[in-house]
Amino acid sequence: MNQQLSPPKIILDTDPGGDDAFAILWLMSLVKQGLAELLAVTSVEGNVNAKLTFTNACKLLQLTNFSEIEVGRGVIKTQKEIADAAFIHGNDGLGNLAHTLPFPQQSYEKARYSDEILIENLTTFPGEITIIALAPLTNLAAAETKSPGILKQAKEIIIMGGAFNIAGNVTPEAEFNIAYSPEAAEIVFNSNSNLVILPLDVTRSLIFLPQMAESISEVNPESDISQFILALTKAMTQTSLSHRETQGISGFLVHDAVTLAYLFYPETLQFQRGRVEVEVMGKLTKGKTICDRRHRAKMGTNAWVAQQVNSADLFAAFLEDLKILV
């Protein structure tokens, strides 16, 4: 095994968000272990408004003692296809627990826009940066529009989004991150061929249970991170059950965590190569992701699409890494 490999350079594009928060905590544990280098967090308008997602990202970085990492403010979409997801994530995006987290040191008003941060870093480190996108793709699309071809400079773009062979979660056909701005998704999907897409087809089996949170907190029950994990799990479980997201199982879906599993524990996932496109015109299907599975020669494949996930192995890694963080 090559011990000389350097940790991947990452930009995290996120709209925290309960499941985003757990993905951020997992990533920060990996950074703490020296397994990842987080260059920046580019916040996105999505689960809640742009100022709240910026503030939440800053607070989570401060909670984990990484407040020096730059956070960008999200590019605001003037015309929205769907409403935000505060009804799931709480009015503040974090289960109405944001007030329990440290006050952010970074200022939303003074922060750089996320597309500027993406363009600068991709220009500085061509072919080296992995973008992990946990949110609507408005920042990435804005960067590509402002600097055509810039997304080709990413090593790969890992996207939690889409629904292929199952129902959507905001319309019968569409998943939230894609449905929020299908036009942005179309720009990103057409930008290059180094996409990795992790859709609802695999994330719907990732139910984080209260006893998992308890097992993490037992390592250090008094830590602020342990207390936050317990409280956020309780809040997200309540809303998930009320919206029938987990088939009656007490827990909530950590959709976004699957992106970290792909990058650091790839044995937990199986993929199929294909050409992924998004419906931007349909009256009933706008935001639907489509992959041509007909048995015929294809040109222009652009993505690896996750087909299966080993949830037991994924959670085993997830829990042990979070225990290191607390």
Image (tube, rainbow, N blue to C red):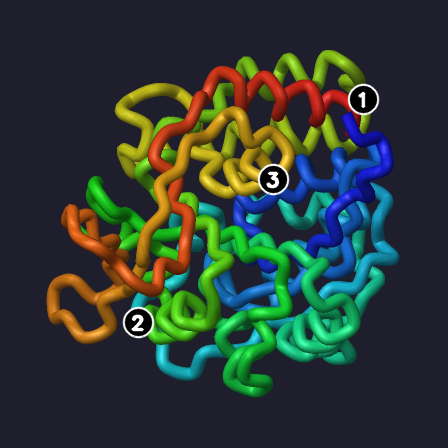
**Which secondary structure, mark 1?**
loop
Crowd class of label 3 (few under 14; some 14 to 19; many from 20; radius 10 Å):
some
At 40% from the left edge and 71% from the top edge, which residue is drawn?
190
Q: Nearer the viewer, residue 147 or 228?
A: 147
Give the Cα separation between the discs numbered 2 and 3. 31 Å
At 58% from the left edge and 53% from the top edge, which residue is drawn?
132
Q: Position of residue 81 (x, y in %)?
A: 30, 71
Q: Nearer the viewer, residue 291 or 117?
A: 291
Badge 3 vs badge 1, beta-carbon distance below 8 Å = no
Q: Quadrant of residue 107?
A: bottom right
User: Which quadrant, please, contains the N terminus?
Assistant: top right
Residue indicated by mark 2: 81
**Which secondary structure, mark 2?**
loop
Give amino acid for label 2: Glu
Residue 241 shows in this picture:
no
Residue indicated by mark 1: 222
Residue indicated by mark 3: 263
